[in-house]
Each structure stands twice: as structure tokens, then as C-alpha cells.
Image (cartoon, grey):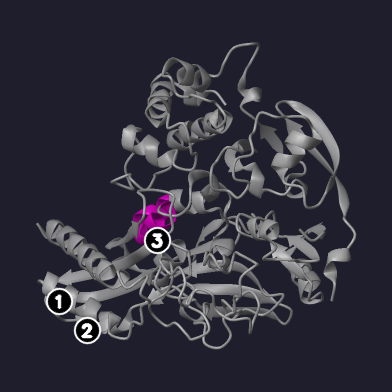
Amino acid sequence: MRPFAYVRAQDAAGAVATVAGDPDAGFLGAGTNLVDHLKLDVERPGTLVDVSRLPLDRIEDLDGGGLRIGATVRNADLAADPRVRHDYPVLAQSLLAGASGQLRNMATTAGNLLQRTRCVYFRDVTTPCNKREPGSGCSALGGYTRYHAVLGTSPDCIAAHPSDMAVGMAVLDPVVVVLGPQGERRIPFAELHRLPGDAPERDTVLEHGDLITSVELPALPVARHSLYRKVRDRASYAFALVSVAAVLEVEQGRVGDVRLAFGGVAHRPWRARAAEEFLRGRPATEESFREAAAVELAAAQPQPGNAFKLPMLRGAVVAALRDLTAAATEGDR
Amino acid sequence: MDDTTTAPVRQRVTLRVDGGERSLEADTRTSLLDALRDGLGVTSPKKGCDHGQCGACTVLLDGRRQLSCLTLAVAADGGEVTTAAGLVREGRLHPVQQALLDADGLQCGYCTPGQVCSAVGVLAEAAAGHPSHVTADLDADVVLDEAEVSERMSGNLCRCGAYVGITEAVLRAARDGGGSRP
């Protein structure tokens, strides 16, 4: 591990100025992903600015409804918040489906969004990887691809975003508040994470020195009818093979508002807008749900090692929407 | 650029460990786990994977179960650490420790200090009403059962496979009010 200087940030603006002014510096949150990467030599910062104790650890009601989630709110605390559990169950469930109890006690909201892929080649510095070392090649193509993307891939990278929480957030259309050297800006959640394209080293649209300070959830009454369904290799403490975040409104047997996002299948949380558009107004039946999944997956480009994700994801979509439909029907009685 | 020649940076780290103040001069790269074990001689937390996957290094940091292998010692400066050894009071085992013995919740024992700290954290989290992945109703009170304990303890691996005894021990400790004692 390369030696580094450690600075505990006193305020957000100072932290941003320090990192923005030093190309060799980076932010340290809880470190659950970064410290691992330091040990693996995947990350080699010269200076770490610790932002984990900044006073950004509150969950506040927004005027007019919605919640502001501070960047350093721990995953466990966010999942346990009564407002999140009641008004945004998909978010609480996605958080609880991720990592372990210890890690959820540590990991921050912003850190969860900015965690790196768990592609085994990205984490192994002895192998070529365009994300870790641009231009060196992609070892996953033709390699071990069980946890890799099937949607939105590029010839340079097939890594998948590992977060569960981000998938749960994607259906809620939050705003990510970012403090940069030029001041504050607000980024729609859907625009935060990138597809790999020809620059897979960039996970997000953030620039060096940009610090996420909060995530704002809009008031979204329909989100009470939501859930997160995760399929993995073991029942707990494993990354998603595929996952589905779903919000569904059923009106007289037909689909009203519907929001779908997929995890484990793309370089970013995958908002399934084609499936959503297909579903609006159609009968809330398994047949519609299956067709909607097929519409979304028409453009998928799986590898031999992860083609199983397509039928698995279709099944997860149908199951998620079927359960929400059943709950809605139950609620009508 | 050869950045491997950067000089190591050392900083003073002061912690409260199992009730006493301890201080050391540590390289910034030192994990809390290595600071405890190698720097301070506190060998109760164990090094298993050193990458946050096994839970053997679990300690209570400022009252919450956390992984000491993924925590930088400098980032924990000023913190309060409780290890499994520190849960013994006046020679008496913590109810979770006693339950692990009674329920045969260990074989080799290497993962046990981590299991103990994690279980103490589980009981406190459940008492505070925190739901888990297997909690059916997110708005309802939490009732610990076998499924809940298995899910909540999933961050602690046991290569001897003593899970049946560990789960039983945590349930017994929960029934006996073990969560009320830190």
C-alpha cells in the first residue's frame, strides 16, 4: 500500500478545496470499499480527506414533502428510519438486502452510491482492466462473467454496478446534491452514474473534488406500493446476480404509475423505461409483466457466462410486479 | 511517476479500548485491527480475511458493531472500542458469551470474538427496532426468531460450521435479556 497523508475534514467546503487542489488526493468516507482497494493497490491516493464525520448525518423532512438524506447517514440508520420504511419501502428493502450488519453500520449514503464495481479483474492489479488502467484491455470479455453486465455494455467494459441501495433509489427519482470547487449543483439521480462507453474509468459524471452532500427524495405517495427483489448465489451477504426495484399503481386491474429499475445487470442502476412505457395502461397481469421484461431486455448483450441473467431477470420482474399487484388487490378489499 | 517512494506518514492515535485509554503512533495505513493487535496487544479481535468478508475482526466501535479491518486507525482516533474480551465484567462472562458456551456455539473458537461482538450488536439493533432483510412487515416491531438471527449474523463466517449453536445462543441471550447489557 502506498503511504498517504490523512486529514480529517473540518467542513465540506474545505474538504472540497483540499481534494480539488490536489490531483493525488481523494475523499474517505467509511472506507468499507476504499480501504479494501488500498490494500489491493487498486487505489493509490497520496492524501485522504476524511469526510465521514462532517455534520451531514441527518435525515430531514423537506418543505412540501420528501426527505433530505445527508451524505454520511449510515446505511443501517437510513434503512431503520420510520419514514423510509413506511413511505419508501423499496429503499429500505434495497438497503437491507445489501452487505452485512457490520457494513451497513459503517457505510454511508454517498459512499454506497460511489462504490466501485466488484469485477474480479478490476480488483486484481495483475490483470488488464480498462476501468482501473485505461487502454490496458478488458479481461472480463472471454473471462469470468457471472457478476457482469448484460445491458448497456461496451467493447471496453462489461462491469456491473454493485449497489443495491442505488437501484432502490433509481425508481424514486431523487436529486443528488453535489458541492464542487465552483459551488453547489443538483444532479438528477438518473444522470449521476454513466454507462462505460469508451471511458469506463469514469463511473459517474462527478469531477475530481466533487463531494456529494445529500440525496433528496421527492414526495412520492405511490412509492408506498413498492418493493425490492434480489436474486443471489446465497440467501444473505452476497452481491446481486439480478435485482428489481419496482413501484406499481394498479387502477381497476390496469397499470397506472409504474417504475422499474434493475441491479446487477449494467454499469449503472438500470432504469427500465421501455418496460415502464409498455406497461402503462395495460392489464396488470403476468402476461403483461413478462412482455414488458422482454421489451426491456431486447437490447441485452449477454456473455456466455451470464446469459442466465435474462430469464432470471424476467422471472424477477414478473414476481415483483405480481406481488405488488396482489398487495394492491388486497388493499382494495 | 514512481509514487512508491512516498515516505510513510505516522500519526498519534488515541482510543478508549475496553474501558482504558490507549495511545499509539501509527502509520496512516494501519487498520484499526492491526493497531489493536500489533500496536496495543489487544488480540481479542481476529484477522480472518482482512477484506471485510468474514467478520472475525468485528468490534463495537462507539457502540456499534463494525469491521476493524476496514477501518483506518487514524479515522477511529478518539473512538471507543469494545472487544469481546472487554465484555467480561469482574470475571463474569457477558450473557452472549455464556450462551455461546451453553449452546455449543463454537468449535475452534477463532471466529468467536467476532461472533460475540456481532451478536451483542444484533441484540441492540433489534431492541432499537431495526428491521432486517427477512422482516416481513417493515412497520411492525422486530421479533427475533431463527430466520432473523441467521440473517442478522450473516456477516460472521464460521468455518467449523457451528451456525446451529450460534443461532441458538443468540436466541437464548435475546430471551434472557442479554441485549440490555452493552
Circle 3 residue:
A240
Magenta segment includes B29: no
Label whose residue precedes the other's in the sequence (1 or 3): 3
Q: Quadrant of the N terminus of chain B?
A: bottom right
Q: Provide residue A83's location: percent of width, then percent of height.
A: 41, 54
Q: Amino acid at mark 1?
A: Ser
Front position in the image: B159 or A250: B159
Label whose residue precedes the other's in the sequence (3 or 2): 3
Looking at the magenta stretch, what is its main secondary structure? helix
Give me the disc on residue A89.
none
Which residues, given as a range, are shown in magenta? A81-96
The chain ID associated with circle 2 is A
Going 35% across and 33% down the picture, which residue do you hit? Answer: B144
Q: Amino acid at mark 3?
A: Ala
Looking at the image, do the residues carrying marks 3 and 2 touch, with CB atoms under 8 Å apart? no
Circle 2 residue:
A278
Looking at the image, do the residues carrying marks 1 and 3 touch, with CB atoms under 8 Å apart? no
Circle 1 residue:
A288
Q: Provide residue A6's location: percent of width, then percent of height.
A: 81, 57
Looking at the image, do the residues carrying marks 1 and 2 touch, with CB atoms under 8 Å apart? yes
Q: On screen, A175 above or below B91?
A: below
Would you say residue A294 is visible in this rendering?
Answer: yes
Q: Tell me: B163 left or right of A212.
A: left
Magenta segment includes A86: yes
